[in-house]
């Protein structure tokens, strides 16, 4: 790994609490604040619910800069949820983050396909994902943040 995203390991309780309680995004992106979705909040905070599917990404100084989770859809496909520290969003680092996560999935799992789900208003993330080779495969309405919102599903084969 190069750049700012240098070390991936299991998400610690301390960093889970940092993400859940202190990562707050500006404007419409506050949709992604963990405190806004009780189910997501409880999952990341609880070691029992988090299990071994959440990972933290640290920079060279050992600071938390991103996290992701791997949720199996079946034996071949996994949905990836991810987040970057608010201080780094909008700075052109999304492509590098996606690349680091893809490489991790290829090296450490047997999944052949990554699925992403992004709120349809989040054009910034959609552009990053599509530039990274993800293709739109559908649209679904999902319960989140106390309501029902439109999410775009994207997919990419990650096998060499």
Image: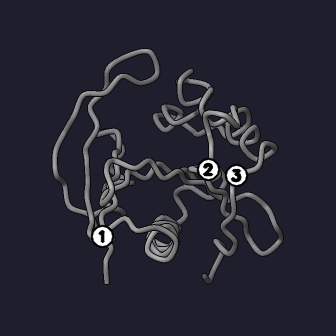
Q: Residue at x 46, y 34 (%)?
A: 28
Residue 13 is tagged as none
Relative to residue 86, is residue 18 drawn left or right? Answer: right
Q: Give the numbered dot on residue 131.
A: 1
The residue sitting at 25% across, 58% down in the picture is: 155
Task: Give the alpha-carbon distance from disc 1 to disc 2, as whole Å.
Answer: 29 Å
| Mark 2, residue position | 52
Q: Quadrant of the N terminus?
A: bottom right
Please tell me how crowded label 2 is: few (under 14), some (14-19), or many (20+) other residues with Cα within 10 Å: few
Q: Is residue 140 left or right of residue 26?
A: left
Going from N to C along the chain, the mark reached first, 1 or 3, is: 3
Residue 110 lies in quadrant:
bottom left
Label 3: state its secondary structure: loop
- Percent from the top left, x then y, of residue 25? 59, 39
Q: Is residue 82 left or right of residue 74?
A: right
Q: Nearer the viewer, mark 3 or mark 2?
A: 2
Q: Which residue is mark 3?
A: 11
CA separation in Å, label 1 and label 3: 28 Å
Instruction: Pinpoint residue 37: horizontal percent, then vertical percent.
Output: 53, 24
Where does residue 125 sit, x and y in percent of width and height? 38, 54
Query: Percent x, y for residue 101?
Result: 50, 67
Query: Toward which corner of the image does residue 106 lie, by quadrant?
Result: bottom left
Q: Find numbered disc 1 in the image and state the secondary structure of the residue it sits on.
A: helix
Q: CA distance from mark 3 to mark 2?
A: 8 Å
30 or 52: nearer the viewer = 52
Q: Residues within 10 Å of mark 3 (few under 14, many from 20)?
A: many
Left or right position of 94 against 12? left
Name the residue rendered at 47%, 76% in the picture. 103
């Amino acid at each position: 790994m190069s750049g700012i995203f240098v070390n991936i390991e299991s998400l610690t309780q301390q960093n889970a609490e940092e993400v859940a309680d202190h990562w707050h995004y500006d404007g419409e992106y506050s949709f992604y604040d963990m405190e806004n979705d009780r189910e997501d909040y409880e999952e990341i905070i609880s070691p029992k619910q988090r299990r071994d599917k959440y990972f933290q990404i640290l920079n060279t100084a050992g600071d938390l800069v991103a996290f992701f989770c791997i949720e199996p859809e079946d034996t071949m496909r996994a949905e990836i949820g991810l987040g970057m520290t608010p201080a780094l969003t909008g700075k052109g680092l999304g492509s590098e983050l996606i690349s680091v996560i893809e490489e991790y999935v290829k090296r450490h799992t047997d999944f052949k396909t990554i699925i992403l789900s992004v709120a349809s208003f989040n054009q910034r993330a959609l552009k990053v994902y599509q530039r990274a080779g993800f293709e739109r495969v559908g649209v679904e309405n999902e319960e989140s943040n106390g309501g029902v919102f439109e999410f775009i599903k994207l997919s990419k084969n990650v096998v060499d």
